[in-house]
Amino acid sequence: MYEIKKTETKNEYEGLRSLWCQTFGDSPDFVDKLYDILQAKGYIALDEEGSVLSSLTLYECGNYHGKNVFVSYAICTEPEARGQGIAGALTKHVRDLVIADGHLSILSPAEESLIKFYSGLDYEPYFFSEEILLNTSNFNGLKAIIQPLSPSEYSEYREIFLADTPHIQISKNLLNFIDEDNSDASGFLLINQGDAVCTLSATSTEGFYISELLVNPLLKNLSSEIDEEIARSIAVAYGADHVRYRKPGNRYCQSMLAGLASDSDIAYFGFPMD
């Protein structure tokens, strides 16, 4: 037997945080920062003794089709309690709360095999993107001219560059959290005075990752490979010999949605909160 509820006490939150850190390897400080900046809410399944068996973190990530979008994040279960449907029941409970309030519920399957599982909970593949890995050793172009952007400046460019792409308009809180979380990398950047904007999430030569690359639509007609050229030029500016980057596309499902009928367009979420 178990009880599903919102976290209300310090002990309940600490139980959620402990299970999160145990499952995903994050630090307690990271979890605390996420809850603080994103004003997140915790939901848990408790056993009869009050121990946390499963947990889910809910936060608002932005707006889509005029509705607020809430992410069910860091869904996890104690190893000995897995396979009993507890996480599924918890996920459905939170999904129903979000939809009943007139909002949209999304989640990101950690691996492709989970798409079928979440489809059984009335989520459907909805937000897609593409990731590309490139070597920079044969790049003969110029290094990118790079300027830092504030979260609000990045948001303005993002909305302009994605004007013709169905997408989630990212919330101010999520932009601020991503900016804080990238403090050891380079955060939000303007490339070549407006050719593109990007978010750097890792800048070491071993792991150079652009978690979002958005190219000015005016440049896309010049070359079908313009995003690859820009991604390489950014990596070269940092001395990296390869680059992995994410952009709008339809190659893989980044997030699944409940609470809105599907349309024919390929929609985009983008940031790596998955």
Image: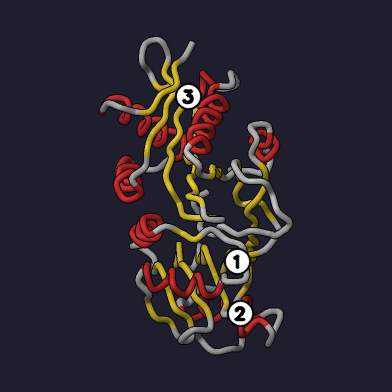
| Real-space Cα separation, disc 3 to disc 2, in angstroms | 46 Å
**Residue at (42%, 26%) from the top-left corner?**
44
- Report the side of 38 relative to 205 (left or right): left
User: Who is closer to the viewer here, 200 or 134?
Assistant: 200
Residue that label 3 marks: 78
**Residue at (26%, 28%) from the top-left corner?**
10
Residue that label 1 marks: 247
Where is residue 157? Give x, y as percent.
Answer: 47, 75
Residue 19 picture quarter: top left
Q: Earlier in the sequence, mark 1 or mark 3?
A: 3
| Real-space Cα separation, disc 2 to disc 1, in angstroms | 13 Å
Where is residue 231? Give x, y as percent.
Answer: 57, 75
Where is residue 176? Give x, y as percent.
Answer: 35, 59
- Residue type for callout 1: Lys
Residue that label 2 marks: 217
Q: Earlier in the sequence, mark 2 or mark 1?
A: 2
In this view, 173 is above or below 258: below
- Residue type for callout 2: Pro
Q: Secondary structure at mark 1?
A: strand
Q: Secondary structure at mark 3?
A: loop
- Residue type for callout 3: Glu
Q: Earlier in the sequence, mark 3 or mark 2?
A: 3
Task: Determine contact: label 2, label 1, CB under 8 Å.
Answer: no
In this view, 105 is above or below 136: above
User: Who is closer to the viewer here, 216 or 245?
Assistant: 216
